[in-house]
Amino acid sequence: MTTQTDPTLPEGCAFVIFGVTGDLTHRLVIPALYNLAEANLLPEKFCVVGITRKEMSSDDLRASLMKGLHDFATRPVDDAVAERLLYCVTAVSADPGNPDSFDKLRERLEKLEADRATGGNRLFYLATPPDAFAPISRELGRTGLLHEDPGGAWRRLVVEKPFGTDLASAKALNAELLKIVPEHELYRIDHYLGKETVQNILVLRFANGMFEPIWNRDHIEHVQITVEEKLGVAHRGSFYDATGALRDMVPNHLFQLLSLVAMEPPAHFNAHAVRSAKAEVLTAIQIQSETEALKNSVRGQYVSGRVGDTEVIDYRSVKDVDPDSTTETYAALKLTIDNWRWAGVPFYLRTGKALGAKRTEVAIKFKQAPFAMFRCTPVQELSQNYLVIGIEPVEGISLQFNSKIPGPTIAIDGVEMTFEYKDYFKVAPSTGYETLIHDCMIGDNILFQRADAIEAGWAVVQPFLDAWAKAAGKGLQVYRAGSPGPDSAEALLTRDGRNWREPG
Ligand SMILES: NC(=O)C1=CN([C@@H]2O[C@H](COP(=O)(O)OP(=O)(O)OC[C@H]3O[C@@H](n4cnc5c(N)ncnc54)[C@H](OP(=O)(O)O)[C@@H]3O)[C@@H](O)[C@H]2O)C=CC1
Ligand SMILES: O=C1O[C@H](COP(=O)(O)O)[C@@H](O)[C@H](O)[C@H]1O
């Protein structure tokens, strides 16, 4: 999200992709670069260096990326733009297990940089499985490829998710990477921050005067963060079974939403101020004991069912999933934030796979009117006041309040006022990676995660991971694919006299 008024054209650079033959590169990175090229937001002096451990010609790589672009582009592909982009691509073989190959990579890169006059600016994008992040970075450090340039060219490292699998591994990865590259040149991606609707939370809260006075414990009763998916685990059995819903979604995506909703207003719209405010609120989340974590959480695993028209098999029958797996495909948590703004306001989070609907939203529930003089409806029966920030599939904001039903007598009903992006803004569909990649190239890390925020997030999640690991299968609920999730997720709120918000 560029902090300037006009989009900034990045300086010339080499865009080096590790994992260029993989799914992410084909599905998201190249289509995003294409959309940037089409919008004239790529530098003129530019090259893409695609790293693979295989032997591959540049022509074969370009053909594969062109096919990926046609398969995954978000807009009709203009072949002239695509060819211009792919003309910049060179395949280079390098394997972190083979140091010689990185020495050769250095030579190849320096030659390409000279040919394309990129000025020595380098962006290394780690689009590989996470266990390769540290080995590749070490080689980049050893060969000096990532070193600060005495001539002033920049060197940046972009790291995909997941960033660690628990608090200890996230700390270890941070420590390892920060030996090689300074924090301000390290871009830890969370694709939720690429979503317009997520970026808009900052604008909603801080570009409007009317929300801040009521954005606190005096007026907000509780907050719900929901990320429901219809998709099951499909072909990702091996990754998912070792990961689970909590690790996969909560310390990253759901905590991005939570921190944007709950942070204090930063004094400046820059990376330092915004990321400090986000980290601060994450460190204010109460760290629960394992006993509290068990009491304040629900986990579930789906069994076969029907999601829309699709038959979904048992999670335990998915390829590469342990047939006795106790990995959760659904997680719900109750968290509290120990600061003056949020004391006593619970934050309920839920996320799951193979559910009946795709829905990502933040619902802010305001306190009831203290007294309603209307005899027709007791105050507890008035419709609840929610401000709902819709991330997907509804992209917009809605406000639910009570209104008089037209007629000679007083009768009240809940109504909804909705803003949807599609009604106001005509924008070409994007992958969600364009802003993130553009920001890496212009050196703006406002939309990237900082080490302290990542570690604060894992610290909150750790007692849940530990308690669930010790409980093994005990307490794991079963839910049918296509259902709203395990029944006990409802109980997490009803025991507090609350309910999950359901649309409509
Ligand atoms: N796919 C997606 O939609 C998304 C993926 N991500 C993240 O992006 C990253 C890449 O995901 P994805 O593309 O799906 O993964 P893939 O399994 O498709 O792997 C990407 C590529 O990485 C290379 N690779 C694999 N292991 C190593 C290794 N040990 N050292 C160096 N290179 C290696 C392989 O290329 P080769 O054999 O040619 O060297 C492979 O094609 C992951 O961290 C993932 O979590 C994030 C969001 C979405
Ligand atoms: O990172 C991930 O996110 C997706 C959900 O992303 P969304 O943008 O569709 O909400 C999830 O399916 C996947 O398991 C996870 O790794």
Image (cartoon, rainbow, N blue to C red):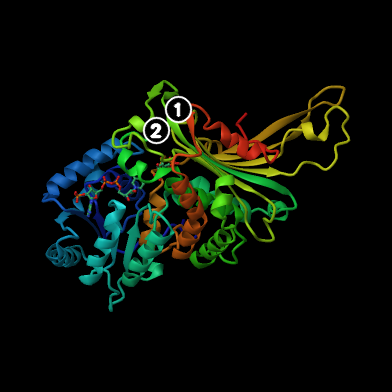
- Secondary structure at numbered mark 1: loop
Judge by depth and name the residue closer to the eye, 164 or 145: 164
- Numbered tag placed on residue 74 in the rendering: none
Q: Name which residue type carries label 2.
A: Gly
Quadrant in which residue 172 is drawn: bottom left
Residue at x 50%, y 67% (from the top left corner): 272
Q: CA distance from mark 2 to mark 1?
A: 8 Å
Quadrant position of residue 386? top right
Task: Say if residue 207 shows up in the picture.
Answer: no
- Tell me if mark 1 has few (under 14), some (14-19) or many (20+) residues whose alpha carbon lies within 10 angstroms of its own: many
Q: Which of 155/95 is in front?
A: 95
Residue 65 left/right relative to 214: left
* Residue 34 screen position, x and y as percent: 31, 46
Residue designated by label 1 = 481
Say which residue appears at 43% left-offset and 57% top-offset.
7
Marks 2 and 1 in Cβ contact (< 8 Å): yes
Q: Depth check: 335 or 307 in front?
A: 335
Residue ID for mark 2:
232
